[in-house]
Image: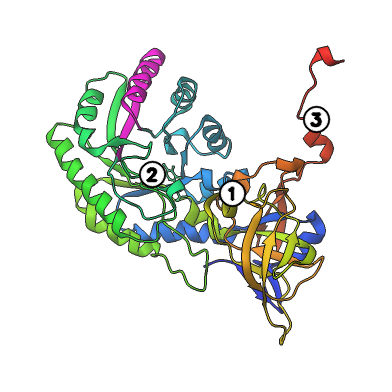
């Protein structure tokens, strides 16, 4: 469910008409709905009701400071994967004790930052990382709370670039080696074992891989407890998929995902932690762009829009589908026709959709790409020297720019010229 709806034929974000935002900030831009972000957090909270649980928003999906403030106000913790994300969480007012640090390549500097600033747990992904974390913690006179991220070798049945739970992925420790790694961790003075972590991938549209992975985590919990470890927290990761093509996709609901959690690990008396990113932010945002030209090719018509792959890379990178809809609804009787919808960048990969049926449109018309709130703005770049596009937040009938578009001058002045060139 989201809050992007047509009213009198004009697409709105909550109570704000999108042409009004376009007139104020120019196109292209991202726009996020506060009500949708809040709703998606609540849906997870309700799915886990009755279990001791904590929701850590995976901010790599959308780490705009205003979005983080909304999540923090809802009571969410944060899952971070870099020192920069840790700093954002702290700046958004999230206490260190609500921040979980994930990622395969944490540096000593990042560990130090989090140990000094406070941390709920590190999700450790390798033995070398465990040993370095122990050293860093001892050096600071601290004890690092950890889980070990186990790799259950299950196929998440998602796009290869975002599957993380197979043994040939770089993530986690093979579950068969877990007991040995926990034994090593248990003997370290700078480490405190608090639980187990698993995250098998992103955009999962089937619950079976979750069920398989969580069952293995339940078994491991019992084994590790027998080995004398105090396993009291299970971090089950994120990854629940969203409907990108609304006409024919119906991924499992958070409620059903919650049932799988209850049925697989609910009996263990552990605190359940989850790390959703995409499901919270994805359908809370859209990208609005305008048509620059409609170009008739040979056997194929193109809509050239002012957004490009540098603004939204998902179609180019993951062959991802985004529903593309007109901001002003087509008049009755105008038949949709197939178009390739492309950006202005000098690569054929800069294609958002091929042969997509879309109502007749012309230069200046506004178009919205749905489901663009996650892995959209955060993955954007200034390729082709196209300034980062603005992000706008709507709340009821109000809207505000939450990241401004840099001017050409600001963009250029980020580069510096060495003295010897003067
Ligand atoms: C990316 C990631 C998530 C969030 O995944 P979504 O598909 O956005 O829910 C959660 N945990 C970890 C460790 C991740 O790397």
In the displayed orientation, state which residue is furthest to the bottom: 333
- Location of residue 231 by image quarter: top left
In the displayed orientation, state which residue is furthest to the left: 226
The residues bearing labels 2 and 3 have C-alpha atoms spaced at a distance of: 39 Å
- Relative to 33, residue 335 above or below: below
**Numbered disc total:** 3
Density class for disc 1 (Cα within 10 Å; few <14, some 14-19, many ≥20) is many
Name the residue nearer the viewer: 158 or 379.
158
Judged from the image, the secondary structure of the residue bearing numbered disc 2 is loop
Which badge, 2 or 3, is on the more N-terminal residue? 2
- Location of residue 140 by image quarter: top left
Density class for disc 2 (Cα within 10 Å; few <14, some 14-19, many ≥20) is many
- Relative to 216, residue 91 above or below: above
| Residue that carries the numbered disc 1 in the rendered image | 67
Report whether the residue tagged 2 is closer than 8 Å to ligand 1. Answer: yes
- Residue span colored magenta: 125-150
> Is residue 234 in the magenta section?
no
Percent from the top left, x then y, of residue 288?
70, 60
Left or right: where does residue 267 sit relative to residue 132?
A: left
Which badge, 1 or 2, is on the more N-terminal residue? 1
Left or right: where does residue 61 sit relative to residue 131?
A: right
Report whether the residue tagged 3 is closer than 8 Å to ligand 1. Answer: no
Name the residue nearer the viewer: 130 or 249.
249
Q: Residue at x 52, y 43 (%)?
A: 60
Name the residue nearer the viewer: 119 or 176.
176
| Residue that carries the numbered disc 3 in the rendered image | 413
Name the residue nearer the viewer: 134 or 177.
177
Image quadrant where one finds the C terminus: top right
| Residue that carries the numbered disc 2 in the rendered image | 164
Report whether the residue tagged 1 is closer than 8 Å to ligand 1. Answer: no
Q: Is residue 413 visible?
A: yes
- Relative to 79, residue 110 above or below: above
């Amino acid at each position: 469910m989201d809050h992007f709806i047509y009213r009198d034929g004009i697409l709105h974000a909550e109570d704000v008409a999108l042409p009004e935002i376009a007139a104020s900030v120019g196109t292209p831009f991202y726009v996020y709905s506060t009500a949708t972000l809040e709703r998606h957090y609540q849906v997870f909270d309700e799915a886990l009701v009755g279990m001791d649980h904590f929701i850590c928003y995976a901010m790599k999906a959308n780490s705009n400071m205003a979005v983080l403030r909304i999540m923090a106000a809802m009571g969410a913790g944060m899952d971070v994967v870099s020192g920069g994300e840790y700093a954002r969480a702290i700046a958004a007012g999230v206490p260190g004790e609500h921040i979980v640090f994930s990622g395969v390549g944490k540096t000593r500097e990042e560990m130090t930052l989090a140990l000094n600033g406070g941390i709920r747990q590190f999700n450790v992904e390798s033995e070398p990382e465990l040993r370095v974390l122990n050293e860093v913690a001892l050096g600071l006179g601290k004890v690092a709370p950890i889980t070990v991220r186990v790799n259950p070798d299950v196929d998440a049945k998602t796009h290869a670039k975002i599957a993380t739970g197979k043994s040939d992925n770089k993530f986690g420790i093979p579950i068969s080696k877990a007991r040995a790694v926990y034994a090593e961790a248990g003997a370290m003075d700078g480490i405190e074992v608090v639980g187990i972590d698993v995250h098998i991938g992103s955009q999962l549209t089937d619950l079976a891989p979750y069920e398989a992975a969580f069952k293995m985590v339940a078994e491991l919990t019992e084994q590790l407890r027998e080995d004398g470890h105090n396993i009291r927290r299970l971090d089950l990761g994120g990854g629940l998929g969203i409907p990108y093509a609304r006409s024919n996709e119906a991924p499992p609901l958070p409620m059903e995902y919650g049932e799988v959690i209850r049925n697989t690990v609910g009996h263990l008396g552990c605190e359940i932690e989850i790390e959703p990113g995409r499901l919270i932010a994805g359908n809370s945002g859209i990208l609005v762009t305008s048509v620059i030209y409609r170009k008739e090719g040979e056997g194929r018509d193109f809509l050239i829009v002012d957004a490009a792959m540098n603004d939204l890379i998902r179609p180019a990178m993951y062959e991802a589908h985004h529903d593309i809809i007109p901001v002003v609804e087509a008049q009755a009787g105008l038949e949709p026709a197939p178009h390739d919808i492309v950006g202005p960048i000098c690569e054929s990969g800069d294609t958002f959709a091929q042969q997509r049926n879309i109502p007749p449109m012309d230069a200046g018309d506004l178009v919205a790409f749905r489901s663009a709130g996650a892995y959209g703005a955060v993955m954007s770049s200034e390729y082709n020297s196209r300034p980062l596009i603005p992000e706008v937040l709507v709340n009821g009938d109000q809207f505000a720019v939450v990241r401004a578009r840099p001017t050409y001058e600001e963009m250029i002045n980020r580069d510096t010229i060495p003295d010897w060139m003067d």
